[in-house]
Structures are given as structure tokens and as C-alpha cells.
Image: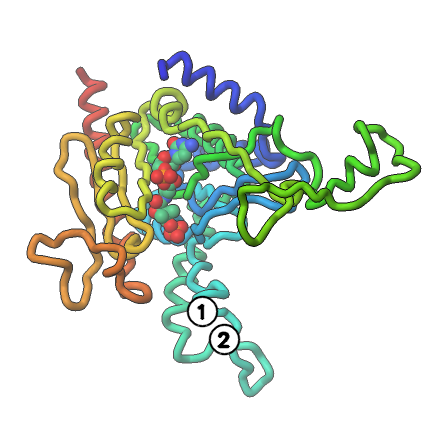
Amino acid sequence: MSAKESLQAEDAYFASNPPPKQLAAHTTLAEAFITQHAAANRRVVLVTSGGTTVPLEKNTVRFIDNFSAGTRGATSAEYFLSAGYAVIFLHRQFSLLPYSRHYSHSTDCLLDLLHEDSDGRVAVRPDDSVRILDVLRKYQSARRDNMLLLLPFVTIGDYLHELRSVARLMAPLGSSGLLYLAAAVSDFFVPPERLSEHKIQSTNIVEKLYPKNTSSPSPSPQIEDEETFDNFDASPRVPRSKRLIIDLDPVPKFLKSLVEGWAPLGMIVSFKLETDPRILVHKARYSLERYQHHLVVGNLLSTRKWEVVFVAPGREDRWLRVARHGGWGDAEGRPLRPDEAPEGDPEEEIEALIIPAVAELHDAHIAKSKNGEKK
Ligand code: PMT
């Protein structure tokens, strides 16, 4: 696709997919946040996190979703804050958040850490108070210093509108802006012109009640199920009228727009998710060559908490791995096969390795762009 064609695809996408209601409010918040931290000469990172939904109806009852709980994004945001970055956290609504993620319902339920003391007051159980205090201090410091801006999204359309707006606001930061795209982004969606207005029905009741799209109901509706069966289908035989066949279009690749238009001087880090270890590095390299950005962090679904690979222009591929009892694979430290993924979570968070390594590449990106500016 030529640059002109991809710009046209981008314009068509944004013109036909409505922005989220909160876009203007989010843009105002993001602008003030960026201005404040730019004035303090602080680096700003946009972290995207969690899954994007694909609605099947305008009045959405059903949608397609993906596995991401936002662990990578929420954990990364904490390490960026520790490294001194101001963080815009563009996340899927109700997915994990920095700091509170430690006490989500699926990890440690906060209620289990509390008890009633002898005066009838609620208190933290003494054994848990040290680790809660550590998280609490970091959380309160981020809030006090306005270092963390939370912007929620739900659908793929919301996400792309928000991403474009925030990325454009970050453009004036030049090379000190960092975009870290850890959200699990849908590759396919239903375009608005094919979206059903109302809940998709499993019967043809609407057509029977309102024949030929009339606005008043038919006086004698014939409501019975169609008995049209496919003759090629074995058991269970399902009438064609009861099937739901979903026809999805590809979501335009926005990484190109990001690199070329929205935030051309910032450092752009994308993630590449695969399940087949044989293609991970190739696809990461391909993405880098295609979009000409600065770093692809490759990860496999099954081992993503244990190892990732950094693929960057002009550098050797670099695997980052958390410490693992019993060592790693063979002597070459080959990547884990999906069936070798250890049970549970590692003791060390891999983001503790990822963020310092990204920050180091960001230093180099800033230095390179300053040298370029001097010439
Ligand atoms: O939340 P967790 O459970 O911790 O999981 C973390 C994670 C596995 C989701 C995360 O580490 C990760 O890999 N995120 C990227 C997932 C993804 O969208 O991968 P992809 O291979 O489908 O896309 C690759 C890149 O293309 C992504 O950076 C995406 O932002 C970008 N993209 C995707 C779709 C699209 N239409 N245009 C794009 O530019």
C-alpha cells in the first residue's frame, strides 16, 4: 500500500467509526498532563494496555474480546513510574491498573488482607502490612505528584481514536516521548455499515412482526422457525436461520500512521504476540522493517511472563528472561517451547528487566536525535 493509500484508509476509518464520548475530555486531561511534565523536563510515556473489544451490535450486547487482562501494561506502568517517567495509561476499562493490580479479585482479594481489631476497627493483618505499605507508598506518591493519568477505552474504535489523539499531543515532546504499545489489539472488526442496530436475534421475529421494514406491526404475524436446513451438514443439524455468520474486515494497521504522522519523533515500541515459537522472531523483524519504528518486543502467549525478545534495528536479537530454577532450555538458552511453560507466575516480574532495557534504548534514541539536530 502506498503512503497516499494508507492515509486514505486511515481517513476513511476515522471518518466512519465514531469517536468515544469521552474523547474530548480525555484529550483535555492528556494535554494538561503532557504540558505539566514537559515543563518539568520529565519524560512522558504512553502505555497501552488490555484487550480491545469488537462489538457485534451498535446497542452492544455481544462482542468479540481477547485474553488480555492488562498485566503487562499495568506492571510496566509501575516500573516506568519507578524510572521517573510520567505515565499516560490508556487501558481497557476494568482491566488491571498499576498498584491496585496487586490486590485484584484474582490475585489477593483485599478483603482477605483485612481484619477487625479489638476496638471494632478495620485493620490490615500484621503479616501483610509491610508489602501493602510498599505498594501504598508508591501509589500515593504517583497520585500526589500527578505522575499517572488513567484513560479507559472499551472497543477497538475507542482505542484507535484515543491513541491517535494522545499520540498527536505527544508529538511536540519530540524524541523524549515514548509510546509503549502493549495492548492486545483486535486485527478484525465489523464496520459500522454492517453493524446491527439492535441485539442480533436468533429468530426472524423482527421481519415477521414488521414485514418489509414497516413501522407498525403486522396484524397477523406468522411467527414460526424456518425449517431450512443445510443438506451438507451432519449432526447436529442446525437450520440456516439459526446460525450467526460473522463477516469481519481487517482493522487498518495504525503503526504506520503512528510512525509517519502522529508522533514521528517519539520512540515507538510495539509488542508482537504469537503462539508459534518458530515464527515469533521473523514476524517481529518483519514488523520492524515494515513500520520502521524503534523496537519490537516479541512474546509468546504461553511464556510471556518468563521471556521476551527485543528486536531492534541494527542490533542483535536480545532475549530477556527472569531467573528460573533449573536454568533455561539448553546450553544456548534457547527459547522455551509452549509446552515447557512453567506453572504459575515467576517470582521476579519480567517487566523489571524490560523497562530498564527500554529506558536505555530511549536514552540512545534521544541522544541520536540530539546529535542529528546539531548537524
Ligand atoms: O495483558 P497480558 O495478559 O499481560 O498480555 C500482554 C500481551 C501479550 C497482550 C502483550 O505483551 C502484547 O504482546 N501485546 C501486543 C498484542 C498484539 O496486538 O499483537 P499483534 O501481533 O496482534 O500486533 C502487533 C502490533 O501491531 C501491536 O503492537 C499492535 O499495537 C499493532 N497493530 C495491531 C493491529 C492493528 N490493526 N494495527 C496495529 O498496528
Residue pictured at 43% horizontal, 50% vertical: 68
Q: Is mark 2 within 8 Å of ligand 1?
A: no
Residue visible at 46% across and 30% down?
A: 251
Neighbour tally class for label 2: few under 14, some 14-19, many 20 plus, Cα within 10 Å: few
Residue 273, can we see it? yes
The outermost residue toward the left is 331
273 to the left or right of 60: left
Residue at the image point whose x is 12% and y is 54% from the top: 333
Amino acid identity at mark 2: Asp
Q: Position of residue 151 (x, y in %)?
A: 51, 42
Q: Which mark is residue 48?
A: none
The image shows residue 178, relative to residue 110, as above or below, that is: above
Residue 149 percent across, percent down from the top left: 47, 44
Looking at the rendered image, the quarter that the C terminus falls into is top left
Residue 103 coordinates in the image, percent (x, y): 46, 65
CB at mark 1 closer than 8 A to ligand 1?
A: no
Q: Nearer the viewer, residue 172 or 211?
A: 211
Q: Which residue type does callout 1 highlight?
A: Asp
**Of residues 130 and 340, which is closer to you in this image?**
340
Seen from the viewer's position, the closer of residues 159 and 333 is 333
> Looking at this rendering, what residue extends furthest in the right direction?
219
Task: Give the residue at mark 1.
Answer: 108
Q: Is residue 350 left or right of residue 206?
A: left
Q: In the image, which disc is placed on residue 112?
A: 2
Quarter-of-image position of residue 328: bottom left
Q: Is 296 above or below relative to 97?
A: above
Callout 1: SS: loop
Q: Are marks 2 and 1 in contact (CB under 8 Å)?
A: yes
Look at the numbered disc 2 and give the secondary structure of its residue: helix
